[in-house]
Amino acid sequence: MSSSIIELMLLAAIALFVGWRLYTTLGSDAGPPEGRPRSQTPPTPDAEKQPSREQKADLRPAFTGPAAAGLEAIHAADPDFNPREFLAGARSAYEMLVGAFAEGDRATLGKWLDTDVYETWDAAIADREANGGEPPQLLRLRNSEIDDASMTGTTARVTVRFEAELGVGDMNRRSEEFWTFMRDTSSADPNWLLDDVDTAG
């Protein structure tokens, strides 16, 4: 066998070996080699859409309306304070406390009312019980909005105007009241107490 034929056979063997190695390493368009799953790179979040730590720190609720200055002061003392979330909680508190007052549930009222308000409501319940009066029933909470807000030292106060329809016996009447909630922002307790109740007009 001539030397040229031997050289051609060696070159063909080398080319075949190199081709096989490339195929097993990189795979082919038909898919990965059997038994070896194709590696997948997890998607990288779009950096422009992900707020930085500094941007997250700048996120804050918007304070508008006549109570804006007071809400701003409360937020400065308690960065977790959010007017929208507060108002949602105030609506739930209104429904719960009106229901507790109607049922004479002093235990619930004692947890959420300041001393002066509790004493007034307790006296009203006692008078109703003694004279057989009809308790008010909340038919519908028509509207609620923050009317005022302030900071005195570490004590935050927010006043909410509630418009509701109440049923007393066979009569329905419209109620408009201003409920003021208070909280010590230096306390770890996140709950607000009902500090004052005024009737509109």
Image (tube, rainbow, N blue to C red):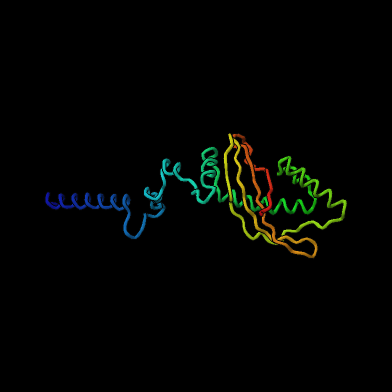
- Measured as percent of width and height from the top left, residue 15 is found at 22, 51
Number of residue marks: 0
Q: Nearer the viewer, residue 58 or 91?
A: 91
Is residue 171 placed above or below 48 in the rendered structure? below
At 41% from the left and 41% from the top, the residue drawn is 54
Q: Nearer the viewer, residue 130 or 36?
A: 130
Is residue 21 visible to the viewer in this orientation of the structure?
Answer: yes
At 68% from the left and 45% from the top, the residue drawn is 196
Q: For residue 193, what is the image quadrant?
A: top right
At 52% from the left and 47% from the top, the residue drawn is 68
Is residue 41 visible to the viewer in this orientation of the structure?
Answer: no
Which residue extends farthest front?
201
Q: Quadrant of the C terminus?
A: bottom right
- Measured as percent of width and height from the top left, residue 71 is found at 54, 44
Would residue 100 be found to the left or right of residue 59 on screen?
A: right
- Measured as percent of width and height from the top left, residue 53 is found at 43, 41
At 52% from the left and 51% from the top, the residue drawn is 65
Which residue extends farthest bottom?
170
Is residue 155 placed above or below 140 in the rendered structure? above
- Measured as percent of width and height from the top left, residue 194 is found at 68, 45
